[in-house]
Amino acid sequence: MKEYIVDNKNKMRYHDLPGEDTPILFIHGLGCAGSFDYPEVAAQSDLIKHRRILVDLLGSGFSDKPDNYKYTVKEHANYLYNFVQDLKLNKFIIFGHSLGGAIALELADKCKDNIETIILSEANLDKSSKGSSSYEIGSYTEEDFVNSIFDEIINENAHESSMWIASLAVCSSTAISRISKSAVLGGETSWREILYSLNLQKTFIFGEKSLPDNDEIELRKHGINIEIVEGAGHSMAWENPKGLAKAIKKGILYARGL
């Protein structure tokens, strides 16, 4: 892995896989990590020619987990903006999954001129609502979540959602609480509004098992390309990595008019 220093101190760690085609920046969702979610997706033949950058956001995976960091959607987008500037990514593709989609949108809004396309998979477009993991987590006080609820979630779901729990277990409980509260509050400008305002071709990916979803119709109305990953639900990177890679590539080709 490689390291990027955030705020002159904390280190975000990431994989930077070589390729001649436009770089793709992968931004993972709540309780996940790029190093855990996307190696198999990035290795698929559809994406192998692209440079692929798989980040572990601060508080997740192999990256540092400082307790004094804010961990809001906006703060993640801010240091990722500095990251892509320092990598001199003059043109790149953003992929964001779930709550990582909200971070992807805020990042895209900060560097519109450098984005070839943005591809989202079941991303948060609105503030979190009842029933979502981020809403449930964000409803607890940080103290209660860190001191007891986090461990309860790990223990109670270890078998039913073993992949997500394996990834969640190595995250900072503080980071998970704070970004969940950020998701409940929503963005200063709604993430949906940012998506609609971006003057570029956009793709939104659903897992087949997540459908029907009212947003499929709504997003099509706004000219957003829809792709569907067969045999998968929300956790499509694990359930069908080949299908997700194919959907991402189709989104890239759509943006190129191919």
Image: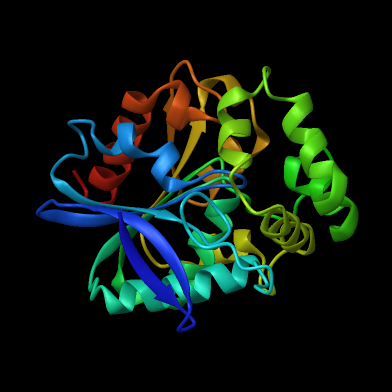
Q: Is residue 43 left or right of residue 75?
A: left
Q: Residue sitting at 29 percent across and 31 percent down?
A: 246
Q: Is residue 181 placed above or below 213 in the rendered structure?
A: below
Quarter-of-image position of residue 71: bottom right
Relative image position of residue 206 (x, y in whole percent): 51, 32
Q: Is residue 257 placed above or below 159 in the rendered structure?
A: below
Relative image position of residue 215 (x, y in whole percent): 62, 40
Most distant residue in the left direction: 20
Q: Residue sitting at 44 percent across and 31 percent down?
A: 237
Relative image position of residue 83 (x, y in whole percent): 37, 73
Q: Closer to the camera, 17 or 172? A: 172
- The type of colouring in the image is rainbow
Q: Closer to the camera, 48 or 247? A: 48
Q: Is residue 56 left or right of residue 214?
A: left
Relative image position of residue 148 (x, y in whole percent): 86, 44
The N terminus - image quarter: bottom left
Q: Closer to the camera, 159 or 232? A: 159
Q: Is residue 35 placed above or below 165 in the rendered structure?
A: below
Q: Residue sitting at 19 percent across and 57 percent down?
A: 22
Q: Residue sitting at 40 percent across and 44 percent down?
A: 35
Q: Is residue 159 visible?
A: yes
Count numbered badges in the picture.
0
